[in-house]
Amino acid sequence: MKIIICDPISPKGIALLQQRPEFNVVVLPKRLAEAELIPLVADATALVVRSETKVTKKIIAAAKALRVVGRAGVGVDNVDIEAATQNGTVVMNTPGGNTVTTAELTFTMLLSLARKVPQAHATMVAGKWDRKIFQGVELQGKTLGVLGMGRIGTEVAKRAIAFGMRVVAYDPYLTEDRAKAIGAEFAPEVDHVYRGADFITVHMPVTKETKEMLNAAAFAKMKPGVKIVNCARGEIIAEADLIAALESGKVAGAALDVFAVEPLPADHPYRQQPNLILTPHLGASTEEAQEKCGIEVAEVIAGYLLTGEVRNAVNLPYLDAKTYEQVKPYLPLGEALGKLLAQLAPAGADKLHITYGGHARLLPNIDPVTRAVVRGFLSTSNLKDVNNVNVRSVAQSIGLTVEEKKSDEPVTFNEWVHVQVLGAGKKLISAGGTFFGSPNNPRIVRLFSQSVEIPVTGNLLLLNNTDKPGIVGHLGTLLGRHQVNIASMSLGRDTVGGLALTVLSLDSAPPPALLAELKKDHDISNVKVVRL
């Protein structure tokens, strides 16, 4: 498996990948532009990047074998997540590697704003001694508004509290109990932070909601003389609005480590603002952070490629190696149920309802099994390249709703996975599966509301027949005449002498001539061929 290191990472991280014989590690000597990188990624299984390399839609489309993109750092806005998901590529980051480093830089910025340290230094280097113009303020007793209470925001809040600051925290996913546990005040809405904070620091990703959220309207709601710190993403601040607020005095000062365009252009108006502190995206630039991120990105990539472990993925739920081993036996069963139903269901299916019963309801993570069911159901369609990563988004794009349920209702089997296919609110068909003897022996045991025993691989011939003596021998004779060997047979019926369901597992696909003969037989109906 070819792994391309596109941006510089810790040598220890590279060594972790190189020591695995399964990997062919290619370290690029410099950052490459899109056009330069495209010819190199055709056979790449993984790409490792920092913030410099842009993993665009074109690069992802060119990387036909790409399974994972590893971002050594937190932000993944340099990776086209939607294109990666559609391509079936997992995108993983390393949120823990630069948490402390970025939090410490944020606090450095807060102290520098409060005491005007960079400006004072500049005058000293210029030979001046201007004490009076650099009178600052204490952090103790001031209110810090934290926008975004993920790992970094939480670490900043802890340090601010240690300095005697009052911390007011806003995050759409923050609960009042969690804020209280940290020692911060819970802000139910962002305006609560704007109105009360002396300092505001941003720790949010760039989304439709957060892009340019600090704009003229937001600054108008803030206290006169507020100070702003941004070590997250430059696009969160409307640059022209911040300059206007600085020039008017509404914002007394700001410290920025990130910018909408990087590197910051030489003629950018920011460079002319005396009350701005600017650093060249140093958030993760410490020896410790670079080593942690390099090692962590190597570990998450190796774990996914070698064991199926999903850690720190932004487009796939977390799945550790232990949990993967627990759900692994259910994956072929789920996929077989999906394939079987897709080939038997009438047109008009718009919903899959998956029920987990018995021991299956105790699985710590049912998402991989659900994805296997849906992938199996979509595998017989004309959709291309459907896999575990993109299967939910593909289903959504074609209007197929997927519902999951863990049921406590009694079941006949120790493990039970049941799938219903619905259309326009009505049940079209269903099937259920379990294991016989061991997790290595999955079986489909319910179909058309009848008991069956069907293996999860191979060629199946399904038909209804009149329940009468001699019919089994008749079927065997017909298949023998066409040189088709029966591997196993499952028989079920509604009533004695009624209509029976016969499922034959075959060593080879039944030829058209056999199918034509079966369909002409007046005792046989609903002849179907299924490939699992």
Image: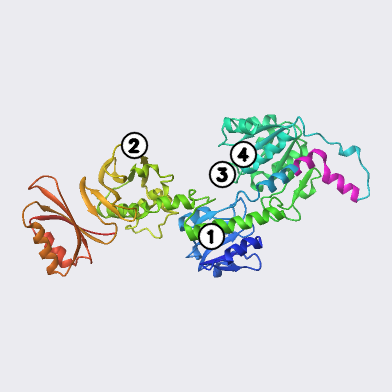
Q: Tag 3: residue type?
A: Lys
Q: Tag 1: residue type?
A: Ala
Q: Secondary structure at mark 4?
A: loop
The residue identified by callout 2 is: 408
Q: Is residue 426 visible?
A: yes
Q: Tag 4: residue type?
A: Met
Are dots 1 and 4 in contact, CB under 8 Å?
Answer: no
The residue identified by callout 3 is: 208
Q: Tag 2: residue type?
A: Asp
Could you tell which of marks 2 and 3 lies nearer the N-terminus?
A: 3
The residue identified by callout 4 is: 149
Q: Secondary structure at mark 3?
A: loop
Q: Which residues are magenta?
A: 108-125
Q: Residues within 10 Å of mark 4 (few under 14, many from 20)?
A: many
Specify the farthest residue to the left. 469
Q: Closer to the camera: disc 3 or disc 1?
A: 1
Residue 278 point in image, percent of width and height? 76, 48
Q: Residues within 10 Å of mark 1 (few under 14, many from 20)?
A: many
